[in-house]
Amino acid sequence: MRVTRELALAVAPELVWRALWDVPRMVACVPGCVDAREVEPHRRYAARMSQRVGPIALSVPLDIRVTEPAPGHLALDARGRDGLLAAEVQMSVRLAVEAAGAGSRLAVEAEGRVLGKLGALGAGVIQRRAEELIDEFASRLRGAIGG
């Protein structure tokens, strides 16, 4: 599964970065994220994602590691396993923020794999759900930062 989006935001890049590093704000922006906490500032986080994909509901504890905290860019890897379903989730997310006119442009690139029973649903179902989640994230982020 791979999803890319570019979002035009009506706020300065600094405000976008502030929001992206604000854990409670991101919990509210990421669909299905029911809990998150900072383990090591700007390096490692723990979160729980609950999602329904088709007829299957899962709850996955995620270990999230920031792999590239460079100016204007952020990359992270997340891995987790739903023990009840024996479903494993692996994803990488890359974010890039740049000035665009009076606001900002946020590029989102997400790649992931789902293994186990959930993965058996098929790539098309998982791809569509991933696209819905990224679009919902974009909508919530715009609302959270006023852009």
Image: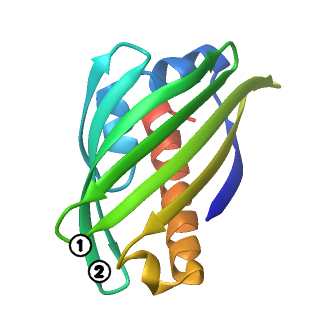
| Vertical relation: 76 (above or below) 82 | above
Q: Position of residue 25 (x, y in %)?
A: 35, 31
Classed neighbour count for the residue bearing mark 2: other residues with Cα under 10 Å, few (<14), some (14–19), many (≥20)? few
| Residue at the limit of the structure toward the left, as seen here | 84
- Type of the residue with mark 1: Leu
Q: Is residue 120 above or below residue 136?
A: below
Residue at far right of view: 101
Asked which quadrant contains residue 36, the reply is top left
Residue pointed to by mark 1: 85
Residue at 33% over, 28% down = 45
Label 2 element class: strand
Q: Depth check: 83 or 99 in front?
A: 83
Residue position marked by numbered label 2 in the rendering: 56
Q: Secondary structure at mark 1?
A: loop
Q: Camera-side residue: 88 or 108?
A: 88
Q: Is residue 92 left or right of residue 49?
A: right
Residue 109: image location, x then y, percent: 67, 46
On screen, residue 84 above or below 38: below
Most foreground residue, 128 or 99: 128
What residue sits 29% from the left and 30% below the top?
A: 24
User: What's the residue type where badge 2 is placed?
Assistant: Ile
Q: Residue at x 66, y 19 (%)?
A: 13
Q: Which mark is residue 145?
A: none
Q: Are marks 2 and 1 in contact (CB under 8 Å)?
A: yes
Relative image position of residue 21 (x, y in whole percent): 44, 21
